[in-house]
Image: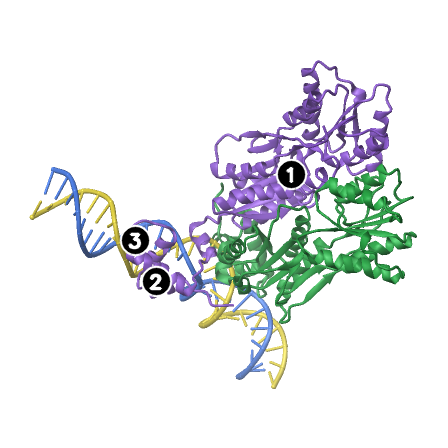
Chain colours: A purple, B green, C blue, D yellow
Amino acid sequence: MSHNYTIKDIAARANVGTTTVSRVLNDHPYVSDEKRQRVLNAMEELNYRQNLSAKWLRSSNTGLVGFVTDAVATTPYAVDIIRGAQDAASEQDHVLLVVSASDTSNSIEDAIEFLLERQVVGIIYAAMFHHAVDLPDNIYQVPTALANCYIKQRDLPSAVPDEFIGAYRATRALLEAGHRRIAHLQVVPPASDAREGRLAGYKAALEAYNIPFDASLCIETFDHRSDENFNITQQLLAMDNPPTGFFCANDRMTIATYQAIMHAGLSIPDDIGVVGFDNQLDVVQNLKPQLTSVQLPHYEMGAWAFNQLLINTSEPIQAKIDCPLVARASV
Amino acid sequence: MSHNYTIKDIAARANVGTTTVSRVLNDHPYVSDEKRQRVLNAMEELNYRQNLSAKWLRSSNTGLVGFVTDAVATTPYAVDIIRGAQDAASEQDHVLLVVSASDTSNSIEDAIEFLLERQVVGIIYAAMFHHAVDLPDNIYQVPTALANCYIKQRDLPSAVPDEFIGAYRATRALLEAGHRRIAHLQVVPPASDAREGRLAGYKAALEAYNIPFDASLCIETFDHRSDENFNITQQLLAMDNPPTGFFCANDRMTIATYQAIMHAGLSIPDDIGVVGFDNQLDVVQNLKPQLTSVQLPHYEMGAWAFNQLLINTSEPIQAKIDCPLVARASV
DNA sequence: TAATTTTATGGTATCGTTACCATATGCTAA
DNA sequence: TTAGCATATGGTAACGATACCATAAAATTA
């Protein structure tokens, strides 16, 4: 652990005042090239490293941004939101302080308090799935932006996926491939905007093709229950007038859907077309044939949220970020 | 944005000296109950919040720990390592500064420099898959611990999964279910310790059951290539003396393996037993039947790494963390 | 009772940086 | 020539906390 030098040491070595060193450090004007170079040399020679605590104390700007999420761990998506925010942050010389809060709102309040103590200049709150959130009052003490969620009062800027357009594209892909009976597997609780938006997009695409909505093709199921998903698909295929297209509300459930389709002796995409949602690479690329899916804009939402913090407009923008379709071999 | 009060304000309001306020803040002895209470009241009334930048500057202990990873985004596992480190950190009143560095070692050096400037008291370096890493010299300027990787010189403490025991258990589960011909699907580059350890565990389990190793049952394949994985499984099943057990080096590839088994008209677990590795919930819980898999100790490695930082022993411990088998319905 | 230790308290220097003020050039415009 | 301004430079007071030192009363011991 080597000793740390200060600007005083640098100033002495370069034979200038500390102010000049500070000016070099912060790219301020009014420093002659000659002295600037002497300072830079001294810093190089002593392997000088700024003490940012001191800088922060003096300038009361830490460049720290808090990143709070309700459950960073439960889903792999979180990472992309963090990464988006992080990339945007480092482009502007900011850092993320990542803290996860469990579901109790008390814990969220603590997490925010924790960040405020650390002098963050802003907070990003990210949700693991698209839904409305309730936030404690202390969040209003610094600029805040939301990713993958929104607040009912709509008084904070937020970025959410455009579920509607994503679902519309997914359904349309099946329609364009000639499918006319299209099942939609929904995910039950929590009641989320993801679910409502995807259902609406599905309905709208059918309507554009003049196909009446058939409630019997629209089934609710649970995430992570392969038996149930398998059975549901089987039952749908056993109908009198069975669907030939499946639009599943997430990629994970398509695994069992694929299995049920194979089990019925049908082939994808020749007999049946399947489209998923989330574009979760671990799943979509390991299914045979590889799954066409809708990409959720996690990365983009993270980046958008960070950029909102710095903009700091008076009126809180509610952004819907596009969800492109990633075509593979399942339609 | 409300004004921030300082200990001076608190001291004035409670009619004590600033030192007394500081003592209350840091739970130091020699403060009468009466004054302590007055200080606490004043803090409550003014909604006082400590300025940690100032505290850090004076005490030169930031409680910040850097968390560097080579590619935080590419795999969902990362999150569990972060979470483990985070939970351990917050238990000790520390925070994680998460930065991701791309593969170039230059970028790792920059990331570390970045953290050193921010006065981190230690650094955790986490890899996305178990392998040896090369780290720049500046890492030695603060206590460092490695998670899911190790350094060739072995001069830094590291935690890695015990791949051997995990693979041994996976193979043994198949053997106990009566399978005697067991295929092992490996993942090709990057050449990792994960691969070698799993192969060794597989071989050891066979040996314990007096079954000779058959190289023709041990096939290399690529991650995220469903067609190839499907074909490999198909070819294995078409052998003269086909395997009835499959030990796959990760869960993802079992999706196509399942499909090939179904396609051959065979059933899991009645005809064929399958075990995966990673215990990736999105996959294992969505396969029918749900997949038995080996749990990688990501969370534990993260927590272990953090705790090493504080212990700071002279000799760098190389820990192998256990990989338990999670039994489900595929064997 | 006197000497010593424990408890209680506050003043002030200090951490490493930047903001502000003071000063001194050289150059241009009246 | 004399303002007036842009350029260049350094000294020093903050920023908000803690560490150290000094002091005094209360409790303990000799």
Chain label for disc 1: A
Which of disc 1 and disc 3 is earlier in sequence? 3
Q: In this view, does D5 lie above or below B123?
A: above
Please check whether the numbered discs 3 and 2 fall on a single chain. yes
Which of disc 2 and disc 1 is earlier in sequence? 2
- Quarter location, residue B120: bottom right
Query: Which residue is rendered at x = 56% and y = 42% of the image?
Result: A85
Residue A69 seen in the current view: no
Residue B166 locus on image (x, y percent): 79, 57
Q: Which mark is residue A11?
A: 2
Label pair 3/2, CB-CB below 8 angstroms: no
Residue A294 locus on image (x, y percent): 66, 31
Query: Which residue is rendered at x = 38% and y = 65% of the image?
Result: A9
Please check whether the numbered discs 1 and 2 fall on a single chain. yes
Q: Residue B261 carries which label?
A: none
- Identify which amino acid the numbered label 2 is placed on: Ala
- Quarter location, residue D30: bottom right
Q: Distance between the residues labelled 3 and 2?
A: 13 Å
Residue A63 locus on image (x, y percent): 49, 48
Query: Which residue is rendered at x = 87% and y = 49% of the image?
Result: B243
| Crowd band around label 3 with a 10 angstrom C-alpha radius: few (<14), some (14–19), many (20+) | some
- Identify which amino acid the numbered label 3 is placed on: Val
In this rendering, position of residue B117 left or right of residue A262 = left
